[in-house]
Image: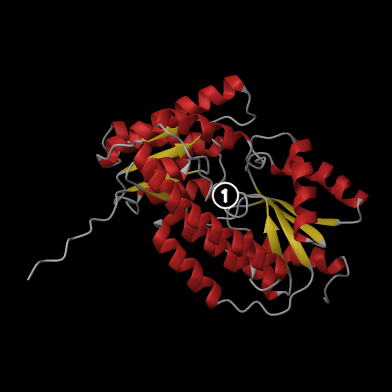
């Protein structure tokens, strides 16, 4: 008998942040695995001292790396998409140089805004990213592997588009959608497709009102979503990078790696504005468009203490929403273990709007 060929799993490359184009990692022979952290949990003294005053979720990501939780990774890419993540990179780079981290660490610095100069800089960053991942995996990135990666990633994007449509239609809960995004960000595309299908089949959202849109800090897990849903509040969309603003499923067709890097840089410039890098006016315009798209009756905002940017957006967003008759309920400066209390406060604020029974 002829032995079945053994399929060797692709090396896993960790991603901290949301700026890495998954097509590049897939084309270089890796499975991109985003490290999310959590809303709650202990933060070791070492992680707290090394990182200093920073977003608690970033501290939990660092703690996971320091504890050996991710020692199976072949490499780690840290995106400079927030002040906290940049701090994490500095810490990990130093520790990797000292042999504390068993894999290489690479910074990915991709400014937003677009334009010829910015796009050229971003394209060079993607070239460096491709070289780094190829060095970790031993696989060559070329036009053929980019085409194959595009096909795999497009299927994932199509599945997530159906997730968005179902959530707006009220046939999928916000927490289930968030789990679908997490699966897409941490598994191979093929595994993620199976997981997304299973999550949808096992979700029974029932009837929930009002339908709200989530803004503010990114949500590393479903803690807050589930609390709001248990109170009868449906979350039909969000503008944070663990959900609808995640960079998953977007690909380019290119005849060469250089062409792909340039095209991906142009795609990057068209991404939704992030709280840590964009003008409040851009964030407000995007929020209004998303409220219209989802048909949300109101907006809920949760902002962690020391998180970049989101709290600055809220006054202008509240004013712009009020002008079109939409309310905004917000809780800001949420402490390291304050997710449950913040969710309860949000629920009370929505109840005061008269939309659900108290």
Residue, x 60% and y 59% (percent of image)?
A: 161
Position above or below: 246 against 237: above
Counting from the top left corner in percent of width and height, residue 193 is at 46, 64
Position of 320 compared to 256: left or right? right
Toward the top, the furthest residue is 117
Q: Horizontal and vertical percent for residue 187?
A: 41, 58
Residue found at the far left of this picture: 1
Q: Is residue 195 left or right of residue 136?
A: right
As drawn, 49 above or below 90: below
**Front residue of 209 and 38:** 209
Q: Residue 45, position in %: x, y?
A: 43, 47
Quadrant housing residue 74: top left
Image quarter hosting the C terminus? bottom right
Q: Nearer the viewer, residue 211 or 7?
A: 7
Q: Which residue shows up at 53% across the image and 50% down it?
A: 57
Is 33 on the left-hand or right-hand side of 279?
A: left
Can see residue 157?
A: yes
**Dividing the image into 4 quarters, which one contains the N terminus?**
bottom left
Which residue position is annotated with label 1?
246
- Asked if 348 appears above or below 86 in the picture, the reply is below
Q: Label 1's element?
A: loop
Residue 28 spot, x, y in % from top left? 34, 41
Tell me which colouring the rendered structure shows.
secondary structure
Q: Residues within 10 Å of mark 1 (few under 14, many from 20)?
A: many
Judge by depth and name the residue closer to the eye, 1 or 222: 1
* Residue at 74% over, 41% down: 283
Task: Identify the residue at image location x=45%, y=67%.
Answer: 195
Would you say residue 36 is visible in this rendering? no
């Amino acid at each position: 008998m002829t032995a079945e060929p053994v399929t060797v799993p692709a090396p896993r490359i960790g991603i901290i942040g949301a700026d890495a184009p998954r097509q590049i990692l897939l084309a270089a022979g890796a499975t991109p695995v985003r490290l999310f952290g959590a809303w709650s949990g202990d933060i070791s003294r070492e992680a707290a001292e090394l990182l200093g005053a920073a977003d608690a979720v970033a501290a939990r990501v660092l703690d996971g790396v320091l504890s050996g939780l991710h020692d199976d990774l072949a490499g780690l890419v840290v995106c400079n998409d927030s002040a906290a993540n940049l701090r994490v990179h500095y810490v990990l780079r130093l520790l990797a140089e000292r042999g504390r981290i068993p894999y290489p660490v690479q910074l990915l610095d991709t400014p937003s805004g677009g334009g010829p100069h910015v796009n050229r800089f971003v394209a060079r960053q993607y070239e460096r990213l491709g070289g780094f991942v190829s060095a970790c995996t031993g696989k060559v990135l070329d036009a053929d592997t980019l085409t194959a990666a595009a096909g795999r990633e497009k299927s994932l994007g199509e599945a997530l588009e159906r997730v968005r449509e179902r959530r707006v239609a009220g046939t999928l809960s916000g927490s289930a959608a968030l789990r679908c995004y997490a699966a897409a960000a941490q598994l191979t595309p093929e595994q993620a497709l199976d997981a997304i299908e299973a999550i949808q089949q096992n979700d029974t959202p029932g009837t929930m009102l009002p339908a709200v849109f989530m803004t503010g800090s990114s949500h590393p897990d479903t803690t807050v979503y589930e609390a709001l849903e248990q109170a009868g509040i449906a979350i039909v969309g969000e503008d944070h990078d663990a959900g609808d603003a995640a960079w998953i499923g977007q690909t380019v067709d290119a005849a060469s790696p250089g062409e792909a890097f340039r095209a991906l840089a142009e795609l990057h410039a068209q991404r939704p504005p992030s709280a840590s890098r964009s003008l409040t006016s851009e964030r407000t315009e995007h929020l209004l468009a998303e409220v219209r798209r989802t048909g949300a009756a109101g907006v809920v905002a949760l902002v962690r203490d020391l998180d970049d940017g989101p709290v600055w957006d809220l006054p202008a967003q509240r004013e712009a929403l009020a002008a079109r008759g939409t309310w905004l309920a917000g809780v800001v400066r949420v402490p390291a273990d304050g997710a449950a209390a913040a969710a309860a406060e949000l629920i009370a604020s929505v109840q005061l709007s008269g939309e659900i029974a108290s």
